[in-house]
Image (spheres, rainbow, N blue to C red):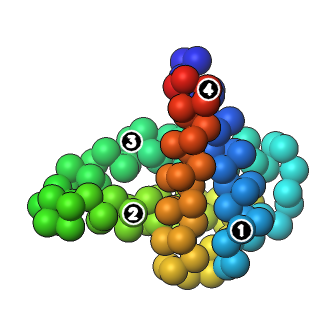
Amino acid sequence: MRNFVLRVIIYAIGIALVAEIVPGIHIPNDTLSTLLIIGIVFGLLNAILKSIITLLTCPLVILSLGLFVLVINGIMLLVTASLIPARLQIDGFWPAFLGGIAMSIISLILERVLGV
């Protein structure tokens, strides 16, 4: 439970930074509660759906030497935005792809710092 709460906080911080860095990703109501809701939805999707999609696309992940995981991260951002469109808006696949790369880097750094 502690790890999930820390991951939600990491995802909330990450999505706030990604919205500032990547053009095409918008958070209309940039409040703490909005960021936490986005973090919860993104965390649940990563815990459940990302594992299933990665398993189903395992041949593509292997053939691309793991680079297809970046596409999966972009898809997770698009699914999150489609589930809560009033809180997170993404203008297309390429902003989601770049946001997925940025989220991966930010979450990697924060997970190492916090020891998750």
Secondary-structure class at tag 1 = helix
Q: CA distance from mark 3 to mark 4?
A: 23 Å
| Residue at 82% in and 43% down | 33
* Between discs 2 and 1, the one toward the N terminus: 1
| Foreground: disc 4 or disc 2 | 4
Secondary-structure class at tag 2 = helix
Q: CA distance from mark 3 to mark 2?
A: 17 Å
Q: CA distance from mark 4 to mark 2?
A: 23 Å
| Residue at 31% in and 45% down | 51
* Between discs 3 and 2, the one toward the N terminus: 3
Tell me which amino acid carries mark 4.
Leu
Left or right: residue 90 versus residue 76 is right
The residue that label 1 is drawn on is 21
State yes or no: discs 3 and 4 in contact (Cβ < 8 Å).
Answer: no
Q: Which mark is residue 3?
A: none
On the image, the x and y values in percent for residue 82 come to 57, 66
Tell me which amino acid carries mark 2.
Leu
The residue that label 3 is drawn on is 48
Q: Residues within 10 Å of mark 2 (few under 14, many from 20)?
A: many
* Between discs 4 and 2, the one toward the N terminus: 2
